[in-house]
Image (cartoon, rainbow, N blue to C red):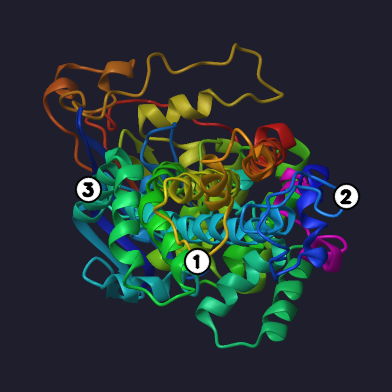
Amino acid sequence: MVAILGPYIAPYPQRSYQPLYEGDAAEGPSWKHPFGVEESGIDVFSEVIHGTRNDMYVGLAAAFLTALLGVAIGAIGGYFRGLVSDLVLGVTQVFFVIPTLLLILLFARIFLGLVFKGFGLTLIVLILSFFGWSSVAFIVRGETLRVKEMEFVEAARSLGAGSWRLLFRHVVPNILSPVIVITTLNIAGFILTEVIVSFLGFGDANTTTWGLLLNEGFIFVRTEWWVSLFPGLAVVVCVLGFNLMGDGLSDALNPRLRE
Amino acid sequence: MTKALLEISGLRTYFFTEAGVVKAVNDVSVEVNDGQTIGLVGESGSGKTVTALSALRIVPRPGRIVDGSIRFEGEELLTKSESEMRKLRGPKMAVVFQDPTTSLNPVYTVEKQLTDIISLHREMSKEEASKSALRLLERVRISEPERRLKAYPHELSGGMKQRIAIARALSCEPKLLFADEPTTNLDVTIQAQVLELLKQLQKEFGMAMVMITHDMGIIADMTERVTVLYAGKVMEVADTKTLFTAPKHPYTEALLKAVPSVAQTRALEVIPGNIPNLIEPPSGCVFHPRCKYAKGICMKEVPRLEKVDERHYVACHLWRELKLEGKAS
């Protein structure tokens, strides 16, 4: 897994923030510019690395926020009964079935103009998490329902622990392994979604992301294939990497396989 | 007579399931005095555990205490608020559960499990809590206590886990300990050790103990007084010795006969049939379908708990006429 992630972790120190302006001509891959040069004279290699940084930020931040929201909402929905539980389940289901991508695009279009420059990506992160927590919440809710009936919870209660303490100190730590797995998979998912959003031109045009590069290269894909190919490859490798990592983690954290 | 530490009377705890109301505990009264060990004995599903959980007011849903009174040190518990109850659980009453593999939280080290409870009830620094956790491990006679503090439950053997669970229950020095079949899931050799440990700890801590079990051997070994439960009802209450030598209830007799002994020459007797459906318990005496002495009246009238003598009560219509066999002690 590290080997898969290595190639795009390693070049970090080498990233050049300043795009290279070397005339207007587009160039194919060469030793100097291994991924070629864009129409406007931007080095695709450094742009891809730029994009890596930004896409990683989106993927990691959104997945983390999603995990936080999902665990909190799912745990409360699973632990408490009655109105709270019904409400949480209802809201989760609504978020589960709505056509997320369309709404993400819509929200991105509406709100991107409203935020300060440089916060575009953060906004994307917020939008992605806002629509993405329901799957985590579902899993957490189910696991909470299971774990809260276990004897050690009763034992802790018999020694004077209150509801919140039981929930967050005894139940939640026991359901973190599926959350970690799904969060890893979510990183890949969110990166992919961000790529789609930017590719469709709904992203933040001031920040380099793989989707934006794909979008820029798309028009000239017949003549200047390198502009699209390399960011595309980066997406594939990255998403594949996180998916494999998720699989690996789910094997490693599966208590049935471990014991 | 000394004032009772715990006094449960007329307790009814029902489970409201979709199939109907399960009367898990149906008019049970139990009394525990300071420093005393009493036994709650009965088959699975007779309401032993639910009685204990009711005393701490931690009956899991859909169960609910519907009637009765539970007095601890003279105070009524059923009218207390949840936060008042929480302060009692641990420092006043604690439970050791049946299965130590599930009653310890698998994600925490032994130290964390113990200090968690200690710091919940006492103002203590982390170091002090750790120290008292270590002292607890020593008191439950765990070898290499320093090393065990850092261990996770899955790294320990069953007997050791149960010692940890006992240590945790004793961490706030309760006045009353419920031991809910604490040795059922342990090897026979470990069982004896754990029971011996409980006996010693009870003396050291000067606490009262309620031993919940279906094992008449443990009852004989550990307790002073016994309450025999069947289908959520009290069948017989007596001093342990009296119960063994002169049982007055057919169910008690049957339980005694179901215990193997070395001197035994006849075949082990089983109690025919199963514990009844608690949604629609049998009419009259709950035990009559399985009772070999049952008569017409047993089907019609619910027997009341009658006084045999000052310390012996039995709920059977026929106790005066029956000549029941006890065990020679």
Q: Which mark is residue A31?
A: 2
Residue type at the position of mark 2: Trp
Residue under pointer 1: A206
In the displayed image of the protein, which residue is found farthest to the top?
B267
Residue under pointer 3: A86
CA gap, disc 3 to disc 1? 43 Å
**Residue sitting nearer the eye, B206 or B263:** B206
**Residue sitting nearer the eye, B125 or B310:** B125
Task: Tally the marks.
Answer: 3
Q: Is residue B96 above or below residue B87?
A: above
SS for tag 1?
loop
Please state the extent of the stretch shown in magenta in the rendering.
Answer: B142-158
Tell me if residue B151 can be seen.
yes
SS for tag 2?
loop
Q: Residue at x 15, y 17 (%)?
A: B296
Residue B171, given in percent of the width and then of the height, sits at: 61, 71
Residue A68, given in percent of the width and then of the height, sits at: 47, 61
CA gap, disc 3 to disc 2? 61 Å
- In screen coordinates, is B129 left or right of B289? right
- In screen coordinates, is B222 left or right of B274? right
Which part of the image, by quadrant, shows the C terminus of chain B? Answer: top right
Tell me if residue A167 can be seen.
no
Residue type at the position of mark 3: Asp
Which part of the image, by quadrant, shows the N terminus of chain B? Answer: bottom left
Residue B328, given in percent of the width and then of the height, sits at: 59, 33
